Image: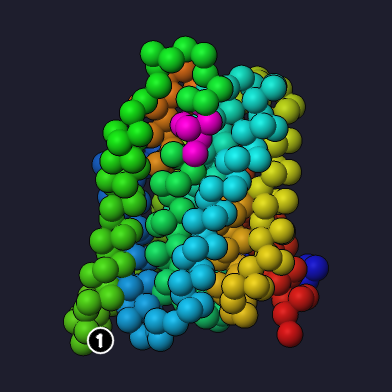
Amino acid sequence: MDLHLIIDNLTNPALLFFFLGLIAVCLKSDLEIPQNSSKFISLYLLFSIGFKGGQELSHSDLDMEIGWSLLFGVVLALMVPLYTFFILKKKLGIYNAGAISAAYGSVSAVTFVTSVSFLDTLEISFGGHMVAVMALMEAPSIIIGVVLIALFNKEKKERTSFSNLLKHALTNGSVLLIMGSLVIGFLASDAQAQGIKPFTTDIFKGFLAVFLLDMGITSGKKLNSFLENGWFTLLFAIIVPLINGCIVAVMSSAVTDSIGNRFLFAILAASASYIAVPAAMKLAAPKANPSLYIPMALAITFPLNITVGMPIYLTIIKSISF
């Protein structure tokens, strides 16, 4: 592995702001990002990456690779919760297993955005359709997680209707915004896109740094309650994402030759949702413990991926590229 790549990643200003947030919590500082500002920044990041992805897609040839990429992303979102559920069920019970498996089958938009910034820094190109792949991977894992809970749950009265679940997953704010921005970016002409470039591109990394500062503060506050649950969840949150990312870094070569696209596939497979899935599980599986699946995704898997995960996946991809 390229040690220089890891060092460059760990000294990235956006990532260092994440660690600053963690340090602020450890020092019991009153540093915080106002909730309204945090929500605006998260909406901005989704809007920006969606719009730019749509622009990239509009300049791409709509070929079989894009179709296979979309299908591959959906298959990943279906397979990960299927195998992780049975690993988790015995130790954590049906409800927690369903919620956690859904989180790890789904994706983290913030991890994806951070990865795009990582690729931009290294001047590695990727296809705009990868934004659509990310958006499509949100809902399937949520549905699989709840279906598994329903299949193994003996308390029939607590089952959630499939239509309500599907509607909730597809109309989730983050999914709707990223898909809508993608379509708008696809329809916009180059001249129209250039008009809002200062907003969609020039200030992107600054907003990302502030958002990661907020994520560091949030992660630090949730870490203690998570660690009280023992070693099993900690190891799962570390080992499973790395396995998923490394396997997909290799498997993705069957779908695309693009280093950037393969890297993003690996990140999507390794990431875990801490926004869309908790919102859905609050409705579908209220007995699942949020102090488990949210800190696992946010406080462990998220920093793992953006520190050592990204260099590992990129090294694997480059080592088997021809």
Residue 72 part of the magenta segment: no
Residue 168 visible to an observer of this rendering? no
Depth check: give the residue in front, 154 or 34.
154
Residue 12 in the image, given as x and y percentages of width and height: 58, 63
Depth check: give the residue in front, 5 or 56.
56
In the figure, is residue 166 to the left or right of 241?
Answer: left
Q: Please give the range of residues in magenta.
A: 144-149
The residue shown at (28%, 53%) is: 176
Residue 268 in the image, given as x and y percentages of width and height: 55, 57
173 above or below 163? below
Q: Amino acid at mark 1?
A: Asp
For the residue carrying disc 1, how many other residues have a C-alpha within 10 Å: few (<14), some (14-19), or many (20+)? few
In the figure, is residue 109 to the left or right of 27?
Answer: left
Depth check: give the residue in front, 168 or 197.
168
The residue shown at (71%, 58%) is: 247
51 above or below 231? below
208 above or below 195? above
Q: Quadrant of the N terminus?
A: bottom right
Residue 143 visible to an observer of this rendering? yes
The residue shown at (28%, 55%) is: 177
The rendered magenta stretch, by its main secondary structure, is classed as: helix
The residue shown at (37%, 72%) is: 53
According to the image, label 1 marks what residue? 190
Residue 9 in the image, given as x and y percentages of width and height: 64, 64
